[in-house]
Amino acid sequence: MKCLFLALMAVGLSACNQQNDNTAYLQSQIDSLRVNSYKPGFGEFMSSIQIHHDKLWFAGQNMNWELADFEMSEIRESLDDIKKYCTDRPEANSIDMIEQPLQNLDNAILHKDKEAFVKHYRVLTATCNSCHQKTAHGFNVITIPTAPPFTNQLFKMQNEK
Ligand code: HEC
């Protein structure tokens, strides 16, 4: 009986050890995923914002308000991603300075007001540059685009004249 008890204890202990081994193994896998998983950098999010900032201008110029609204949400998505994924970059703390200019532009788009759109697009662009200056990236100068970024996209709605 005593023998049986000891044998059961031994089995129990070895199961315990095995579980510890598994936990350690899983933890090492999680750690390696954390280190090795791909995470876009600040500059990649900014490059995406650059494209949508550009398209936004031509959407507004063509009074394609639905597209303008879409481009605004794409810009916001990348800004949110910076906040989420670039927590190691202190520059991310300055993101909020762009919120008011974005809201003003949202308003212009909502009211389909081209004049207000142009005015607030300029303020938005100036804010891009203010943040670049503030974060020691003043050499990245953003301007009002002069030509659409792509030749394979229409900015004017087809059913409008
Ligand atoms: C938080 C302040 C901040 C705001 C607001 C901001 N940027 Fe940036 N931007 C940065 C920083 C910091 C970098 C450098 C990123 C890096 O390290 O690669 C950058 C880089 C860039 C780059 C260069 C990307 C590359 O790798 O070539 C472009 C283009 C850019 N921003 C466009 C914009 C546009 C357009 C806006 C406005 C709609 C904007 N940014 C608003 C901080 C900002």
Image (cartoon, rainbow, N blue to C red):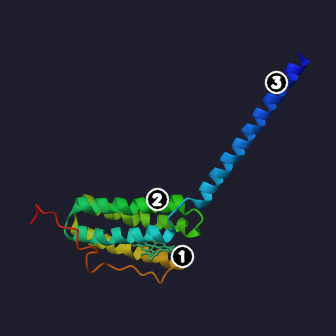
Report, in whole angstroms, how far the alpha carbon at label 2 lies from the one at label 1: 18 Å
Image: 36 above or below 120 = above
Which sits earlier in the primary sequence, circle 2 or circle 3?
3
Three-letter amino acid code at disc 2? Asp
- Find residue 65 and name its label: none
Location of residue 13 in the rendering, given as x and y in whole percent from the top left corner: 81, 32
Neighbour tally class for label 2: few under 14, some 14-19, many 20 plus, Cα within 10 Å: some
Q: Which mark is residue 80?
A: 2
**Marks 2/3: CA distance?**
55 Å
CB within 8 Å, label 2 to label 1: no
Q: Residue at x 35, y 59 (%)?
A: 73
Q: Amino acid at mark 3?
A: Leu
Percent x, y of residue 122: 33, 75
Q: Nearer the viewer, mark 2 or mark 3?
A: 3
Q: Quadrant of residue 75?
A: bottom left
Residue 139 position (above or below residue 97): below
